Amino acid sequence: RVSVGPVTTAATTPDGVVVGTSRGTVVALASDGAVVWMLTPDGGFSGSVAYADDVVYAGSAGGGVYAIDLRTGNPIWHVNSAHAVTTGPAVAPSGTIFAGADAIYGVSADGQLRWKDPALKPGEAGLFALGYDSVFDAAMGDLGAVLTGDGKYVWTSRSFGKITTAASSASGMLYVGTSTGRIFAVR
């Protein structure tokens, strides 16, 4: 047992877990519970944490996404957004990092802003990486949308109702959960 403060999100790593706390910190823990490092992004942590290829991705209440070295806790790069990150980051297998703030952002693995879409506002349910290079956004106003890593829309739909969560399978199936208790399966 380790006390790090109220945990709001977590991502597993090869040797432990990385958590984001409501106190604004990102904490990496080894599998034995040892604190490896702690980092407080500008304005404090916000959104969620994600892990891929020895890099932790975390949102910032001060605006933007941080890429953090898993071993040291040192920031590798930071991409600004105009407002606090509220959803994501989510990492696609291609390496594209998706985050939602005042817009949906697509960022390359080396920290370059690929695109941003201010027309699509992120919703409370979050962003969910799909397939090789796309993301599902449970957007504001009961809108669900799938975007590719280059910011193009694959599809949008308002037929779900209020989206509360989503998950994807390795086979490419998207499962969307709603506030009315329905689950939709979309291929």
Image (cartoon, helix red, strand yellow):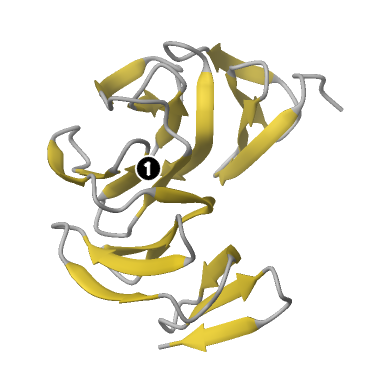
Q: Does any portion of residue 70 appear in the rendered image? A: no
Residue 102 appears at what percent x and percent y? 33, 36
Displayed quadrant of residue 125: bottom right
Position above or below: 43 against 111: above
Q: Does any portion of residue 153 appear in the rendered image? A: yes
Residue under pointer 1: 100
Relative to residue 89, is residue 78 drawn left or right?
A: left
Mark 1 surroundings: few (<14), some (14-19) or many (≥20) residues within 10 A: many
Relative to residue 175, is residue 141 drawn left or right?
A: left
SS for callout 1: strand
Displayed quadrant of residue 82: top left
- Camera-side residue of 26 and 180: 180
Relative to residue 5, is residue 138 drawn left or right?
A: left
Q: Residue at x 26, y 64 (%)?
A: 147
Q: Residue at x 38, y 25 (%)?
A: 69
Q: Residue at x 54, y 69 (%)?
A: 167
Position above or below: 89 against 60: below
Residue 97 appears at what percent x and percent y? 30, 46
Q: Residue at x 46, y 60 (%)?
A: 141
Residue farthest to the right, as pictured: 1
Residue 59 appears at what percent x and percent y? 44, 30
- Camera-side residue of 90 and 138: 138
Total marks drawn?
A: 1
The quarter in which the C terminus is drawn is: bottom left
Relative to residue 141, is residue 13 drawn left or right?
A: right
- Camera-side residue of 43 and 37: 43
Residue 99 appears at what percent x and percent y? 36, 43
The quarter in which the N terminus is drawn is: top right
Residue farthest to the front, as pictured: 141
Position above or below: 167 against 67: below
Position above or below: 59 against 176: above
Amino acid tagged 1:
Gly
